Each structure stands twice: as C-alpha cells, then as structure tokens.
Amino acid sequence: MFDFFTSFNTAEIFKAGMVLFAVIDIIGSIPIILKIKEQAGEIHALHASLVSLAILIGFLILGESILSLFGVNVEAFAVAGSLILFAMSLEMILGVRLFRDNTTGKTASIVPLAFPIIAGAGSMTTIISLRAEFAAINIVIAIIINIMLVYIVLKLTKRIELILGDGGIAILKKVFGIILLAIAVKLFTANVQELF
C-alpha cells in the first residue's frame, strides 16, 4: 500500500512523532487515567493501546471519507471532542461525576480512554494536517512509536499511583483538570467559527 523504500524518512518520523506526542499528551493524561482506573477498577493497557492504534491508523487512511459519509467535517468533529474534554475537566476540578455509566475495566479501556483521550479529536485533526506534509508510512511509524509510549505509561499506572499517593493524585487532578479545560476551550474556539 505504501512505497516504503522511497517514502521512509527518519526526519519526518521524528517531526510527526513529536507533534503527536504533544497532542496525545499521555504524560499529562496520567491524572485522567488514574480517575478512570478509580471508577472502573482496572485498565487493560494492551487493549486500550491496540484500540487507539487501530483508530489512529484507520483515521489516517479513511478519516476524511468517513466524516464526509456522515456529513460531518473535521471542525464539527473537533468541537464535539472539545465538549467531552470540557465535561471531563469539570469532573476533575469540581470533584463531581457527570458520566454515570457502569464501566468496567474493559469498556473503560475503550471509552473514554482509547477514545477520546488517546485517539481523540485533537489527534485525529492533527493526523489529517500531517497528511498534507508527510508521507503516510512515516506518520504510521510515528503513531506506532507514540502508542508504544502510551502502553508503557498505562502499564506503570499502579506504580505511578503508589509514588504520588492520594494527596499527589488529588493535586494533579485539579491542576491537569484546569489544563484540560484550557485545551477544551482552545479546541472549541479554534474550530467553532468554521461551522458558521
């Protein structure tokens, strides 16, 4: 499908990888991951990582076609994602629970962890913009590298939880809740004007 030998470029992989690392922000998502683990009881790291990988690569190949099939543009998709992030940030800051479903470790590993936290609107929008600059094979490799990092962080969740303790987790939740709120507002304002 991809002409590997002519398109492979380590500089492109590095650039695309760094952009995706900043957007996925798995380190910054640690408080959210801990919150999901607290609600669901456990997180299946491999399951979440593989689902995220499938979503991101699938979106790289078919993303714009899928959205146009449903009559949804990238901006509308990003706005919808920003509203989910907004609700999650309110949960973290105010200590309230807005999502009242009976999630288990397996379902929570897919929603909301794999989507929209790891493979969310920001990641998908970024992938579409990266397609204009880089060869598809380099983006795929950058996605795989990032998902490997995601898997490592998810596997170390229990250790991180022990190191931080209850007080550290509570502080991180508030701080990253505000950061997540700012990201949601930025994502919303950057895309909502394109809808009108």
Image: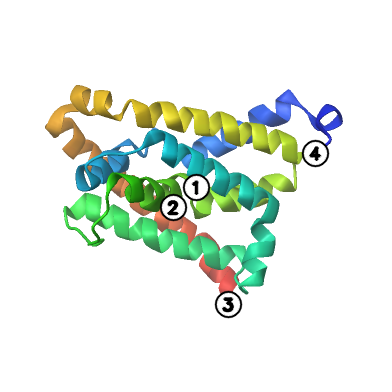
- 3D distance between C-alphas at marks 4 and 3: 37 Å
In this rendering, position of residue 32 left or right of residue 15: left
- 3D distance between C-alphas at marks 1 and 2: 5 Å
Dots 1, 2 in contact, CB < 8 A: yes
Mark 4 secondary-structure assignment: loop
Q: Position of residue 82 (x, y in %)?
A: 43, 59
Please, what is the three-letter code of the amino acid marked with disc 1? Ala
Dots 4, 2 in contact, CB < 8 A: no
Mark 1 secondary-structure assignment: loop
Dots 4, 3 in contact, CB < 8 A: no
Frontmost of labels 1 and 3 is 1
- 3D distance between C-alphas at marks 1 and 3: 26 Å
Per the rendering, the mark at residue 2 is 4
Tell me what residue is drawn at x 67 percent, y 60 percent.
64
Q: Position of residue 99 (x, y in %)?
A: 26, 61
Mark 3 secondary-structure assignment: loop
Which residue in the structure is indicated by mark 3? 196
- Mark nearer the N terminus (2 vs 3): 2
